[in-house]
Image (cartoon, grey):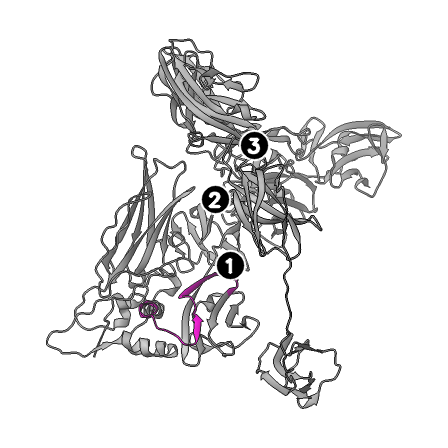
């Protein structure tokens, strides 16, 4: 059995809500090319592609009339922005032709799959202009031999984690070929769907192979809209569709015929129960469904049911674009370090895409990258960075983009503590110790070029960054040169072990003392020792003499006697040791050792120098900036640590970030550095480290934040607007690229033809896009140029194509009379008249005003003439200012003129000769003559008033009466009336009125009142409910009210009962009776059966 559709194929395109489909049923050919309009020069066209092939769409936009670069978006359906889907499957390209001012945008789909079928939209916007174009993609399955599983044709490809899942979005677009010689039954599925209940749609779709349920519902909705049906239950039905933003509220409302009708609300065929999310309201004939905090789960079909009648609608929930709150930071690391790129987005659980250069990163590609997310934060983690990981990393959301650069350098080993030379005696212990920067580095020890092997006496240890070689019970053969070589590095650390041999000779009893000072080891010159700050100094001095001499250590004139503490003296037989634990800068100086015995005295002096890391550099500041670079300078540190400064290391970070990025791994010797590869418009901070032989200083203070910016591009479309005998007016458009530095203004320069010296025309920057250069020499040919200026400097100049000759151009005089002055110009007395009449003509024309052919009186009328207009000014208009004013322009023998009719109006005078013509019954006829003074304009009507002579209170009878007569009716019998008339014109009513000379007396006539006899009606009636109580469902925790109405006379007694129990004076309940309408308000949680009883 073959299922065929009598309508055209379902299109999986989300069209604009409520749009009308005027295409005839049964037509499914490709759309014809539409006529080009708006911004598009070429629009993308609808295509029909074979699955697996590549297709490309091209759109061209003319930017010659645009001030800014246009922005183009490729959309699928209503809201899906394809820009965030760029990758292997979707590729986008943009080019620009400077000659034709045309932007070309291309979208290429690699290996089309059925899931790509549907409706697409191309939107272009540029400031206040926009345009769009729609097109469709139809995908046909490739022809294959033999019968295959049809599900394989709809599996997604190139979909990452969703690859292999079924995608039936284009199933209904596939054209099925009929087999020859086989008769198959045709079934009209749409007829079945139109007659089925919505709850059965999914079952029917599955039975007949329809997988695009959303497209089927949209198509069915259009078919039903084409067949209007009358409804006996609804006055107003639901709209065909509604659109709402995510987390917003939507209200679905219908109007019913019967105000007591009960309605049901269904969602995708399932009844909705009232809750905090779904709120039902019933007010009069209106029935309302309120959906609070809409989610994507609320994107569904809804219907309202009253008995057998129903109405349908569809709700579309739009997801807001996800923006990036915290941007990516740049990283500068060495090989093996951990890198964590962190970004924060505006929505929790949002999908982000990571790319390196143009390649998308995923867990499937490699195990190198780890992806982590926590709420709004997302991380890309590289555990051990390699040189291949260097590059630009991007993160994309459907509403934002950020990028960060990763720089990876080779790892260098830094020596934190070198090996020191040792001098030991026989049987003592010797310890060589060194420290390197990397605790993972191993190494080997060598003695005189031969590797040292561990034994019971010789031990080698490696703890953290410290490597030790320990030799117990030192012997003479242990003396020599010892070297430590780190594995994998071209580096070696060497020191010497000196063996001190003790000889016993016969010494006379009286031997003068002698100091045997060892000048090896740390002694760099005669009697000078250098010690690194923080290290330990132990100076062992051998002393001889008989009897044993007395030892005294002194620093300057201060003796050192302490035997404990940081600085101390240790004494042993024939040996005195001077020890400094953790050397400090204050320990530097000259030290003296003096030994004495009865045979004599000996003295020796030592100079100890304490060297340390330098102080941090000072005065770090930014000298200049560029588009992606900045020049930074600083002052050397005040204290160099006692050894010369070898160079500096620089770091930078974005303002607000805590991640510092190294700018150099090799030592930089100068105090001025140019930092590159920065992002324009982002604030940065810099700091500097000083380095000497001892190590690296603490960081300097951060520089003031600075922003890399670049000058703008040159101004565009520079041209000459006007030329006179000594002036030239130029105008131009802003630069195409302004950048983050903004635009401060322009500089205009000129020079004579053939010369190279440019003269600046304006002292201050010009903000407007036009300027008049003055004081030029008549007849000279001048070149002009304009330069844009911002905080980064001056842009390249914009030059005129050819020199300009400074000479006045003769132009005929012409008055451009405003439209409102081409008819009679009417003003009231006392008003101000200020007429601006623009004109043109070169050289400056002579403007002359006349009134009614005579020169105007300058005492009454003021005139001001300029190069481009003439102003006629009257401070307070009077009646004698009325007349025809003529402006005449004259340039030599050429002239032009224009006339303006000015009419000054005032309030009219009162009507005259007001008289009463006749009085009859309750009426009086009046007549009068027009006023002598009409206020210089037409009388538009009259206002008639009457007054009873008893009270003399005036009441208006007629307003805006056009005729000079009227009849006043409805006068009161027995009263005597006076009348007055006001005249009216454009300015209003006259100041005074014309009063009638006589009065109108309404005489009394004989009248007799005969009352009609009647019988008083009996109003008593028994109590009766005219509107009973209705069942009501409410949400727990909310107040509610129930009501009914009753009729009865005398007023009946009302009793409210709950569960057959009379409600007393409980404050929870408020009982009201308003003109027979009974209301019970319940102000707390309660659910029960209520009853109202009446008693006479």
Task: Determine crowd level at label 1: few under 14, some 14-19, many 20+ residues with C-alpha closer than 10 A.
Answer: few
Looking at this view, name the residue that lies furthest to the right.
598
Q: Tell me where residue 599 sits by quadrant.
A: top right
Image-quadrant location for residue 600? top right
In the rendered image, residue 83, in percent from the top left (x then y), is placed at 39, 51
Q: Are marks 1 and 3 in contact (CB under 8 Å)?
A: no
In magenta segment, residue 444: no
Identify whether 779 is placed above or below 135.
Answer: above
Residue 405: mark: 2
Q: Secondary structure at mark 3?
A: loop
Residue 217, how many percent across, how many down? 35, 70
Secondary structure of the residue carrying tag 1 is strand
Label 1 vs label 3, nearer the camera: 3
- Kindly tell me whether residue 319 is visible in this rendering: yes
Numbered tag placed on residue 949 in the rendering? none
Residue bearing the label numbered 1: 372
Quarter of the rendering occupied by the N terminus: bottom left
Percent coordinates x, y for residue 163 in the rendering: 35, 64
Number of numbered callouts drawn: 3
Alpha carbons under labels 1 and 3: distance apart? 84 Å
Residue closest to the eye, 10 or 727: 727
Determine the CA span between mark 2 and mark 3. Answer: 80 Å
Residue to which mark 3 is pinned: 906
**Circle 2 crowding by C-alpha within 10 Å: few under 14, some 14–19, many from 20:** many
In this picture, which residue range is highlighted in magenta?
221-250
N-terminal label among 1 and 3: 1
| Residue 209 point in image, percent of width and height | 28, 74
260 or 109, which is in the foreground? 260
């Amino acid at each position: 059995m073959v299922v065929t559709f009598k309508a055209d194929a379902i299109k999986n395109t989300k069209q604009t809500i409520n749009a009308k489909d005027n295409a005839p049923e049964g037509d499914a050919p490709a759309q014809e090319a539409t006529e080009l309009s708006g911004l598009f020069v070429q629009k993308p066209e609808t295509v029909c592609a074979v699955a697996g092939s590549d297709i490309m769409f091209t759109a061209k936009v003319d930017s010659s009339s645009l001030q800014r670069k246009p922005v183009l978006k490729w959309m699928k359906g209503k809201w899906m922005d394809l820009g965030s889907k760029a990758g292997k499957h979707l590729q986008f390209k943009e080019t620009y032709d400077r000659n034709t001012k045309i932007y070309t945008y291309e979208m290429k789909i690699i290996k089309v799959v059925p899931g790509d079928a549907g409706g697409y939209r191309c939107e272009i916007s540029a400031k206040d202009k926009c345009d769009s174009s729609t097109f469709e993609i139809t995908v046909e399955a490739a022809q294959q031999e033999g019968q295959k599983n049809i599900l394989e044709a709809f599996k997604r490809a190139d979909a990452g984690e969703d690859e292999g899942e079924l995608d039936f979005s284009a199933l209904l677009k596939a054209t099925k070929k009929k087999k020859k010689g086989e008769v198959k039954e045709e079934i009209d599925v749409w007829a079945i769907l139109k007659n089925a209940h919505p709850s059965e749609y999914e079952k029917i779709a599955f039975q007949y192979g329809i997988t695009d349920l959303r497209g089927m519902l949209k198509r069915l909705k259009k078919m039903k809209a084409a067949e209007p049906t009358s409804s006996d239950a609804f006055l107003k039905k639901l709209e065909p569709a509604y659109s709402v933003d995510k987390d917003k509220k939507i209200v679905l409302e219908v109007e019913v015929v019967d105000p007591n009708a009960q309605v049901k609300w269904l969602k995708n065929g399932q009844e909705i129960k009232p809750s905090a999310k779904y709120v039902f309201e019933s007010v009069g004939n209106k029935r309302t469904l309120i959906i609070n905090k809409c989610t994507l789960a609320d994107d569904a079909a809804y219907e309202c049911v009253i008995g057998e009648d129903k109405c349908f609608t569809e709700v579309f929930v739009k997801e807001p674009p996800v923006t990036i709150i915290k941007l990516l930071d740049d990283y500068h690391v060495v090989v093996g370090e951990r890198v964590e790129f962190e970004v924060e987005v505006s929505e929790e659980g949002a999908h982000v895409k990571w790319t390196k250069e143009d390649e998308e990163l995923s867990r499937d590609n490699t195990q190198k990258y780890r992806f982590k997310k926590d709420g709004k934060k997302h991380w890309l983690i590289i555990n051990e960075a390699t040189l291949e990981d260097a590059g630009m990393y991007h993160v994309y959301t459907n509403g934002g983009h950020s990028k960060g650069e990763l720089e990876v350098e080779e790892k260098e080993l830094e020596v934190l503590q070198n090996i020191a030379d040792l001098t030991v005696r026989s049987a003592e212990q010797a310890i060589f110790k060194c420290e390197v920067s990397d605790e993972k580095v191993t190494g080997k020890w060598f003695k005189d070029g031969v590797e040292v092997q561990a034994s019971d006496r010789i031990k080698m240890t490696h703890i953290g960054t410290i490597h030790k070689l320990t030799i117990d019970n030192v012997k003479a053969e242990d003396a020599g040169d010892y070297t430590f070589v780190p594995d994998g590095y071209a580096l070696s650390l060497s020191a010497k072990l000196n063996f001190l041999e003790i000889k016993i000779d016969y010494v006379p009893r009286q031997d003068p003392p002698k100091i045997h000072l060892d000048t090896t080891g740390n002694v760099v010159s005669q009697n000078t020792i250098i010690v690194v700050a923080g290290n330990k100094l132990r100076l062992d001095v051998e002393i001889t003499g008989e009897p044993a001499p007395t030892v005294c250590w002194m620093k300057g004139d201060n003796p050192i006697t302490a035997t404990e503490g940081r600085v101390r003296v240790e004494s042993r037989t024939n040996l005195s040791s001077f020890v400094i634990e953790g050397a400090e800068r204050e320990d530097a100086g000259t030290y003296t050792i003096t030994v004495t015995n009865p045979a004599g005295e000996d003295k020796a002096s030592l100079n100890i120098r304490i060297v340390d890391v330098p102080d941090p550099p000072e005065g770090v500041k930014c000298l200049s900036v560029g588009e992606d670079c900045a020049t930074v300078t600083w002052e050397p540190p005040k204290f160099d640590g006692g050894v010369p400064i070898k160079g500096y290391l620089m770091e930078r970070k974005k303002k607000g970030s805590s991640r510092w990025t190294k700018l150099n791994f090799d030592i930089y010797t100068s105090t001025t550095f140019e930092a590159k590869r920065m992002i324009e418009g982002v604030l940065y901070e810099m700091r500097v480290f000083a380095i000497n032989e001892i190590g690296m200083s603490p960081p300097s203070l951060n520089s003031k934040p600075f922003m890399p910016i670049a000058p703008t591009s040159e101004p565009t479309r520079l041209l000459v607007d006007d030329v006179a005998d000594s002036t030239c007016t130029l105008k131009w458009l802003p630069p195409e690229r302004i950048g983050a530095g903004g635009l401060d203004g322009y500089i205009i320069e000129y020079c004579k033809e053939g010369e190279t010296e440019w003269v600046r025309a304006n002292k201050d920057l010009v903000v407007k896009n036009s300027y008049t250069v003055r004081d030029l020499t008549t007849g000279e040919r001048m070149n002009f140029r304009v330069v844009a200026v911002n905080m980064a400097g001056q842009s390249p100049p914009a030059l005129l194509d050819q020199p300009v000759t400074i000479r006045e151009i003769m132009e005929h005089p012409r008055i451009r009379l405003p439209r409102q002055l081409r008819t009679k110009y009417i003003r009231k007395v006392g008003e101000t008249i200020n007429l601006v009449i623009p004109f043109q003509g070169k050289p400056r024309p002579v403007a002359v005003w006349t009134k009614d052919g005579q020169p105007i009186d300058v005492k009454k009328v003021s005139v001001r003439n300029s190069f481009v207009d003439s102003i006629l000014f009257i401070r307070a208009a009077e009646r004698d200012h009325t007349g025809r004013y003529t402006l005449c322009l004259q340039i030599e023998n050429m002239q032009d003129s224009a006339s303006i009719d000015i009419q000054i109006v005032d309030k009219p005078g009162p009507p005259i000769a007001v008289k009463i013509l006749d009085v009859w019954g309750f009426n009086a006829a009046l007549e009068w003559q027009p006023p002598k003074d009409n206020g210089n304009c037409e009388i538009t009507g009259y206002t008639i008033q009457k007054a009873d002579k008893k009270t003399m209170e005036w009441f208006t009878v007629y307003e805006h009466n056009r005729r000079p007569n009227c009849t006043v009716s409805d006068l009161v019998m027995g009263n005597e009336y006076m009348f007055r008339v006001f005249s009216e014109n454009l300015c209003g009513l006259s100041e005074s009125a014309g009063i009638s000379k006589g009065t109108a007396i309404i005489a009394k006539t004989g009248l007799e009142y005969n009352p009609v006899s009647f019988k008083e009606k009996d109003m008593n009636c028994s109590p009766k409910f005219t509107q009973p109580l209705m069942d009501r469902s409410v949400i727990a925790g909310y107040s509610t009210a129930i009501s009914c109405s009753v009729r009865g006379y005398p007023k009946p007694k009302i009793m409210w009962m709950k569960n057959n129990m009379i409600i007393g004076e409980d404050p929870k309940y408020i009982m009201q009776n308003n003109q027979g309408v009974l209301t019970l308000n319940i102000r707390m949680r309660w659910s029960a059966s209520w009853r109202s009883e009446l008693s006479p």
